[in-house]
Amino acid sequence: MSELVPEPRQKPVVPMKPVGINANLLGYIGIDTIIEQMRKKTMKTGFDFNIMVVGQSGLGKSTLVNTLFKSQVSRKSSGWNREEKIPKTVEIKAIGHVIEEGGVKMKLTVIDTPGFGDQINNENCWEPIEKYINEQYEKFLKEEVNIARKKRIPDTRVHCCLYFISPTGHSLRPLDLEFMKHLSKVVNIIPVIAKADTMTLEEKTEFKQRVRKELEVNGIEFYPQKEFDEDLEDKTENDKIRQESMPFAVVGSDKEYQVNGKRVLGRKTPWGIIEVENLTHCEFALLRDFVIRTHLQDLKEVTHNIHYETYRAKRLNDNGGLPPMTVETEENHESNL
Amino acid sequence: EQTNCDLFSVYGFHLGLFTLFRSYSFLQNKNDGYRTLPLSGHVGFGSLPDQLVKKSIKQGFCFNILCIGETGSGKSTLINSLFNTTFDDPVSSHFLPSVKLRAQTYELQEANVLLKLTIVNTVGFGDQINKENSYQPIVDYIDAQFEAYLQEELKIKRSLFSYHDTRIHVCLYFISPTGHSLKTLDLLAMKSLDSKVNIIPIIGKADSISKTELQKFKNKIMSELVSNGVQIYQFPTDDETISKINTIMNGHLPFAVVGSTEEVRIGNKMVRARQYPWGIVQVENENHCDFVKLREMLICTNMEDLREQTHARHYELYRRCRLEEMGFRDIGPENKPVSLQEAYEAKRHEFYLELQRKEEEMRQQFVQRVKEKEAILKEAEQKVHAKFEERMLALQEVKLKLEKKKKVLEDEIAMFVEKKANAEVLQSQPSVSTPLLSLKKDKDRKKYVLMLVIRGSKKKFLHISLL
């Protein structure tokens, strides 16, 4: 059979093709000062970080977030008053604060989801959450696609979602699996075992192993996702975290006690004081280092480069048949004024 | 005295409160209405810039320089001196018919920073007799880089974070060291480029001007630029750490530079310099030329700002113009905001139809070719068939002939057998008088048989077994 003439390749726009040549440098030029320049620039513009906490009420979500950021970023709910009605669906409450440390200013937004898993019938209770996350992507997309666009598009996309697992000691609940299955594709999920002071060390290790196995069996890719490891160094580091430490078994507290002459955050019980930042007591310090000190930027980048791009591609591909995003949502933006 | 102290303390307290309040509200304004929270301990996100920097180092940096200047104004030598290396750049002639651009990319590494440096040189600028079209190729090139980036950004499945950015971050414009003023070509070129790229004007081969003449020349150039409304790049002065030095440098524009690829021994060091009979011009001596200032400004202090200005200002302007050109609007004809989405959809529909049409065309072409090929094959098949028929016929004829001959021979055999039978009958009757006869008959018979055998062997089809 004769071959069809292949479609003529589009001529490159650049008139000449650049050739890569490795040039040897003799003497110092100053190229590495760009690091300092970049650092100065980012410190001037500041950072945004949006973290969402999901879990049944009473698992210590607000306390943990307050412990993570060492300030009252999240208001603890004191349980439902008799007079207040339990909300029929999951509410989404986003509260923003600005915190500063070491010259770095961070606008932190904590997104709380009261009502998750609290009803009798919890079917589809992840839907409002998924909708909220997609709405943030949509907002960003709309801004990005404007003709005259802002210099710095405000980033309200959820960078990290901490999912609180109840420390039953047995296995994951169906609700947990359903939620994580649906949302691990749109947002970075970090599963966390809440109130870990109810388990002994052996129970903890067993529970963690079982949870890891169940997540693997159900094909749930939690952060850090295997497929986004960029190089060998990342892979080995992340493998260690994925296979040994996660899910982190944490304890949160905002009260300080005196232990061995030092003031530490902890929980006081008749049988001793549980030190939150002590690695032998719980894994809070690991979670804090993981989320804040090493992988904060990576969380943001994975959200921007992968989850957002997936959303964008899907949105632009759909033939306009998508119903427009409803403006009235359950979100309440409180700025604590 | 105590009341004085009290007053003082109260006053101090109020002052303190006041300043605190002022700074608080100042902060509040800065934070878009978000409240600042104090931290009660060390959290650790102060390492965030380091995390960001680490990622950027892994990705590497891109920097693209465009050098515009007449042939022989010292562009390549300056670039070699700036980056302290010898880039492979062939010398160009003065006789090129039109202006062309030549881009080359190099990978430089210093400490752990990897820089992808692209140098774009103009070739033949200012050489033609008619210089009308001298700067249009340059404008087109810059636009083409913006266009490539825009296309990538508009793609549905895009990979911006691994995109090799080819947009021009800075344009070094080489002014000839005439000592008088700017040439018309310079003014026109810079005017057409100032809204598309960061321009840093440079006086090349500045060792041909004396110090006093140089200052007059610089002033003349700057005043001409201002009076013609050319916007050159100003080093940023909003960051306190570098604003002072940037302001000073802004006053030294345009930089008068000297480049050199040769090294001369001064004291006990080898430095880049140009050796003349009357003295040695040292490239890195600030008294001799502004080379060090240029390097300092371009690389050490403002590289990041140049990149940012290119992206945030020049590229955004290009993008806006281009999208408006393509028919997108933020506000529709009834003054209602039209979503880019809808415009996008309309365009997509258009493209989809075009795609379908092209597909149909290709399908038709394909069908056409299939038909043609089929026709050719059919013809060939028919030919083969015809030949086959022919051969079959020939074979039949030969067969018939052979059948005939076979028949003839068989008849002859039958006749012979008959004769033989008769002869045997005759032989068996008389037993005395036959010996001679039989012998004769024998001889005859044998002769006859021999003849038959000979004929048979000739025929090859029959063989007669001898009795």
Image (spheres, coloured by chain):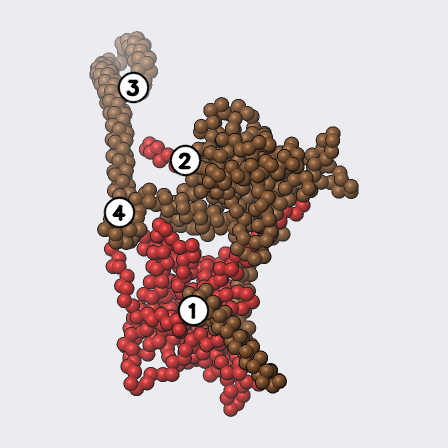
Chain colours: A red, B brown
Q: Nearer the viewer, mark 4 or mark 3?
A: 4
Determine the residue positioned at 60% across, 82% down: B5
Q: Which residue is mark 3?
A: B462
| Cβ–Cβ under 8 Å for marks 2 and 3 | no
Identify residue for label 2. A11
Chain ID, mark 4: B
Q: Position of residue A269 (x, y in %)?
A: 50, 88
User: Looking at the rendered structure, which numbered label has been put on residue B346?
Assistant: 4
Q: Residues within 10 Å of mark 4 (few under 14, many from 20)?
A: few
Task: Give the structural element (helix, strand or loop) at label 3.
Answer: loop
Q: For residue B34, which numbered disc appears in the image?
A: 1
Amino acid type at mark 2: Lys
Evaluate if marks 4 and 3 touch, with contact meaning CB atoms under 8 Å apart.
no
Q: CA distance from mark 1 to mark 4?
A: 40 Å
Q: Residue at x 52, y 77 (%)?
A: B14
Same-chain check, marks 1 and 3: yes
Name the image quarter holding residue A222.
bottom left
